[in-house]
């Protein structure tokens, strides 16, 4: 394994490893606070969203702080050459190569950690028995499902999302001044087509996004769960994207594709677990929340555009607002007498999105009469920025 380890860790031979890494400050600043804390830092999120880049930025910071280069170890656990080795064996071999005792502190960066079946237990044992600081990353939410609570109290979890519009503009080299706010709408229409995956922002390519979706379906779903028919999974995902922003009936999707309700539910879970989609429950009593259809949203507007193209900009805007607000407060949707309001928070803030348009008719009546502590109409990107600051 020694040759493989050196390939992953070029700084051991004083080589530059991180050309052109652009920091995402809103995440990097949070991660830096945890460098000297004991907790395991777990990065989750969609494939190619930038988790590895963030880990390498942390490594670069450690090297600049004169941390011994041999005390920093990065490895991607989905590497085929490591398929027969446990995490514990890999770390032990790393320590042997550099003659590092268990009491000597090392910084471990473990990418795609969920490719190892007993990773929860292994991380616990390494955490408890060695002097380590662990950063782990996964493109599967299964990293969060610790049924035996091995890592309870030992982790800090941070979900990395695609670039938002502000980051997209920064990565694109576009400087927005306050006097240029009138240009936001047109830039947003460009952003819809490209999305927020960093590599695609630098070099927009429809094929890149299609390959990403195919990679997730083939590697993270078909191969990981031992499925045979990946084409039906592609068809299933196409139906999800066509219905993004709407209430969805999983049983109906199953009927359309000729698969059982249980199979449809499993497929739906697979796409959730790989961070390609998010769900939004209905507001109401517990049974209404559990039994009513959920709304779904795409994790990235560029992926959504890949499947549905240039139609219904209001749907893209609603999707974007959801992505901006989902980690700030618990969100639900309102549905009464055939009319819907986009979002409702647990603090009873009612939120409707309209892409540079007005709310009218019976929907307006529901919006004005529903029992809420506050009502907010987000009808522009500028208004969204105000709401973000308020909810923060």
Image (tube, helix red, strand yellow):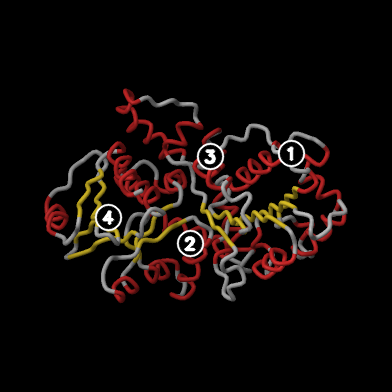
Going from the N terminus, do you reach mark 2 or mark 3 first?
Answer: 3
Going from the N terminus, do you reach mark 2 or mark 1 first?
Answer: 1
Q: Nearer the viewer, residue 265 or 376?
A: 376
Residue at 37% over, 46% down: 320
* Residue 34 in the image, given as x and y percentages of width and height: 59, 51
Q: Under tag 2, what secondary structure? A: helix
Q: Residues within 10 Å of mark 4 (few under 14, many from 20)?
A: many
* Residue 20 in the image, given as x and y percentages of width and height: 63, 32
Which marked residue is nearer to the observer: mark 2 or mark 3? 3
Q: Which of 375 and 260 is in front in this view?
A: 375
- Which residue is labeled 2 in the image? 272
Instruction: Please say if 358 is above or below 142.
Output: above
Number of the label disc, if any, that sits on residue 342: 4
- Which residue is labeled 1 in the image? 66
Residue at 75% over, 34% down: 16
> Gap between marks 2 and 4, in whole Å?
20 Å
């Amino acid at each position: 394994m020694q040759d493989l380890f050196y390939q992953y860790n070029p700084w051991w031979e004083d080589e530059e490893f991180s050309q052109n890494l652009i920091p995402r400050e809103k995440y990097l600043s949070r991660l830096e606070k945890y460098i000297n804390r004991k907790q395991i830092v777990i990065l989750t999120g969609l494939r190619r969203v930038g988790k590895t880049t963030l880990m390498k930025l942390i490594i670069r910071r450690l090297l600049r702080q004169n941390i011994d280069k041999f005390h920093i170890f990065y490895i991607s656990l989905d590497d085929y050459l490591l398929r027969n080795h446990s995490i514990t064996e890999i770390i032990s071999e790393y320590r042997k190569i550099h003659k590092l005792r268990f009491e000597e502190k090392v910084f471990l960066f473990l990418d795609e950690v969920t490719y190892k079946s007993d990773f929860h237990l292994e991380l616990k044992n390494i955490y408890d028995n060695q002097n380590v600081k662990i950063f782990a990353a996964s493109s599967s939410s299964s990293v969060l499902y610790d049924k035996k609570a091995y890592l309870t109290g030992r982790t800090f979890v941070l979900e990395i999302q695609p670039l938002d519009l502000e980051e997209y503009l920064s990565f694109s080299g576009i400087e927005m001044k306050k006097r240029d706010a009138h240009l936001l709408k047109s830039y947003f229409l460009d952003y819809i087509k490209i999305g927020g995956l960093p590599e695609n922002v630098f070099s927009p390519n429809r094929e890149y996004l299609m390959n990403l979706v195919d990679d997730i379906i083939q590697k993270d779903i078909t191969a990981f769960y031992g499925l045979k028919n990946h084409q039906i999974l592609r068809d299933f995902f196409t139906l999800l994207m066509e219905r993004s922003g709407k209430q969805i009936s999983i049983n109906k999707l199953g009927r359309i594709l000729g698969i059982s309700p249980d199979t449809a539910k499993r497929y739906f879970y697979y796409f959730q677990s790989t961070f390609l989609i998010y769900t939004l429950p209905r507001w109401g009593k517990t049974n209404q929340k559990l039994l009513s259809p959920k709304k779904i949203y795409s994790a990235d507007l560029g992926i959504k555009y890949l499947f549905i193209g240039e139609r219904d900009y209001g749907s893209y805007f609603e999707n974007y607002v959801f992505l901006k607000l989902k980690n700030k407060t618990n969100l639900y949707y309102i549905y009464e007498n055939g009319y819907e309001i986009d979002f409702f928070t647990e603090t009873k803030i009612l939120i409707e999105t309209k892409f540079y348009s007005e709310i009218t008719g019976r929907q307006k009546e529901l919006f004005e009469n529903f029992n809420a502590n506050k009502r907010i109409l987000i009808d522009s990107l500028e208004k969204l920025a105000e709401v973000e600051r308020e909810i923060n």
